[in-house]
Amino acid sequence: MPAVVVAPETATGRSDPNVAVVTGAGRLAEAQVAEEAERVVVDFWADAPGLPTDIGARLVGQAFAHPAVRPHRPILVTLPRGESAVLQAVEAHLDQAHSHVAGVTCLVEGRVRGGSPAY
């Protein structure tokens, strides 16, 4: 079974804060979106390093489609260090992006870009 990016909805029809990449073997990667007063936080997780570029881009696209991720809003994104395809996809959605490495995690801060990302 090929990997599928799933953006589940709750029974109320509201957007769920989680987006997942699911294969026949289970979850391969996930993004969790949390809305805070000052910013939105998107936390990416991968079961194994080296998520394929197309899958990473689709996962990021679905996470950035979440209603909490609005244009020009301050954002903090966390992702596993070494996930360069995910990092590139995230940066395509941000203005004023600044990234730092903290142990095994990469932190990216910036503002959500207005309009479509430049791929």
Image (cartoon, helix red, strand yellow):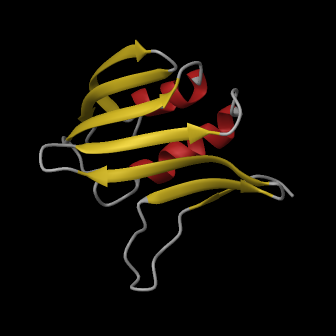
Residue 92 showing in the rendered view? no
Q: Could you tell whether 71 is left or right of 9 in the image?
A: left
Pick whichever, 26 or 75, lies toward us.
26
Residue, x 25% and y 42% (percent of image)? 114
Answer above or below: position of 83 versus 16: above
In x, y percent, where is residue 95? 27, 27
Residue, x 87% and y 58% (percent of image)? 1
Query: Extreme left residue here?
Result: 38
In x, y percent, where is residue 25? 83, 54
Q: Could you tell whether 23 is left or right of 37 in the image?
A: right
Query: Extreme right residue here?
Result: 1
Q: Could you tell whether 107 is left or right of 68 in the image?
A: right
**Total marks drawn?**
0
Answer above or below: position of 91 versus 31: above
Residue, x 32% and y 52% (percent of image)? 34
Quarter residue 4 falls in: bottom right
In x, y percent, where is residue 45? 55, 40
Pick whichever, 37 or 73, lies toward us.
37
In x, y percent, where is residue 9? 48, 74
Quarter residue 50 falls in: top right
Answer above or below: position of 68 versus 111: below
Residue 19 showing in the rendered view? yes
Residue, x 50% and y 43% (percent of image)? 60
Query: Extreme bottom residue here?
Result: 12
